[in-house]
């Protein structure tokens, strides 16, 4: 998304292409003989995928709305803090019991997210608190759908869950794109493809990780790991300079990842 800002303002159109690419890759993963309809648990799988796609789009819409109302810093922070919702649901509804080291790592991850987004930015104002809360909830519930699928649906239908999620997100995002009168051109297709490939693999790997590890480990590690990768990419590819506070945050992130995975 950072790279796309230089070439086009049709950010929603890029998302549409991104979700379509993800769906196409998933379809190839399933194969022509894999779309069986008489499979136990398929109805639950499709429902989880539909809800996941709807929450994905809701999170994006709330992020855009909050950026308009609250600036950039607060929405970015609350978007990352959505892991409170996904991990909280895993503890309350799925009986996960993290140990003290993991809880400490979780707390350090939260502190790092707040710290790295706490730089003073002109124009940032907290006048839409409800929107920030809804952003955190919608994004967190989108992640929770992956955990819900993993707990209640057959593991062999993981690609069915993913393709339903991506198709739902693409269809709903298309409607939003039409509402804002954006269009899909060559630039949007190219950037959408570039975004869609890693998006598919990240979603697929998170789902696979949830089948082997607790959400208490997966979601915080994925969230703070993304922050670390983005920060490093910003330094090497965009010439960004990090403040002492941001360097401290990155150190905290690495510590949190280690503690979460002990």
Image (cartoon, helix red, strand yellow):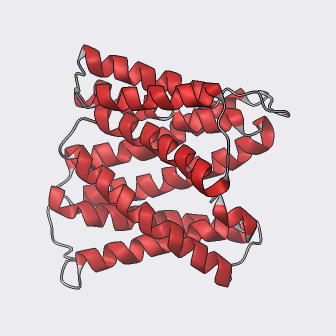
Taking depth in this image into account, of 25 and 138 the one nearest to the observer is 25
In this view, the residue farthest toward the right is 123
Residue 62: where, in percent of width, then height? 65, 45
Taking depth in this image into account, of 251 and 77 the one nearest to the observer is 251
Residue 220: where, in percent of width, then height? 39, 34
Count of number-bearing discs: 0
- Indicate whether 7 appears above or below 82: below
Q: Is residue 163 visible?
A: yes
Taking depth in this image into account, of 260 and 92 the one nearest to the observer is 260
- Indicate whether 246 appears above or below 193: above
Residue at 23% across, 18% down: 99
Q: Is residue 17 visible?
A: no
Residue at 42% across, 53% down: 52
Displayed quadrant of residue 37 = bottom left
Tell me the quadrant of the picture where the N terminus can be found: bottom right
In this view, the residue farthest toward the top is 100
Taking depth in this image into account, of 147 and 99 the one nearest to the observer is 99
Residue at 25% across, 47% down: 209
Displayed quadrant of residue 124 = top right
Looking at the image, residue 13 sits to the left or right of residue 223; the answer is right
Looking at the image, residue 151 sits to the left or right of residue 132; the answer is left
């Amino acid at each position: 998304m950072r790279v796309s800002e230089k070439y086009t303002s049709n950010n929603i159109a890029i998302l549409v292409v991104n979700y379509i690419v993800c769906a196409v890759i998933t379809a190839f993963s399933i194969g022509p003989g894999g779309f069986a309809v008489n499979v136990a648990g398929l109805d639950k799988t499709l429902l989880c995928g539909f809800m996941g796609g709807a929450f994905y789009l809701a999170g994006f819409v709330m992020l855009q709305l909050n950026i308009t109302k609250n600036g950039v810093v607060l929405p970015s922070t609350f978007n990352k803090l959505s892991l409170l919702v996904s991990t909280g649901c895993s503890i309350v509804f799925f009986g996960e019991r993290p140990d003290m080291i993991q809880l400490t790592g979780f707390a350090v991850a939260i502190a790092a997210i707040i710290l790295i987004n706490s730089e003073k930015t002109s124009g940032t104002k907290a006048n839409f608190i409800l929107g920030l809360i809804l952003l955190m909830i919608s994004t967190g519930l989108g992640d929770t759908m992956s955990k819900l699928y993993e707990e209640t649906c057959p593991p062999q239908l993981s690609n069915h869950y993913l393709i339903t999620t991506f198709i739902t997100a693409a269809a709903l995002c298309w409607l939003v794109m039409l509402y804002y009168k954006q269009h899909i051109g060559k630039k949007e297709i190219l950037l959408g493809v570039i975004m869609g490939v890693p998006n598919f693999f990240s979603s697929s790997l998170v789902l696979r990780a949830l089948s082997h590890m607790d959400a208490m480990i997966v979601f915080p590690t994925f969230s703070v790991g993304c922050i670390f990768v983005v920060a490093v990419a910003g330094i090497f590819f965009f010439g960004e300079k990090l403040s002492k506070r941001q360097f401290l945050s990155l150190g905290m992130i690495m510590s949190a990842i280690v503690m979460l995975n002990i």
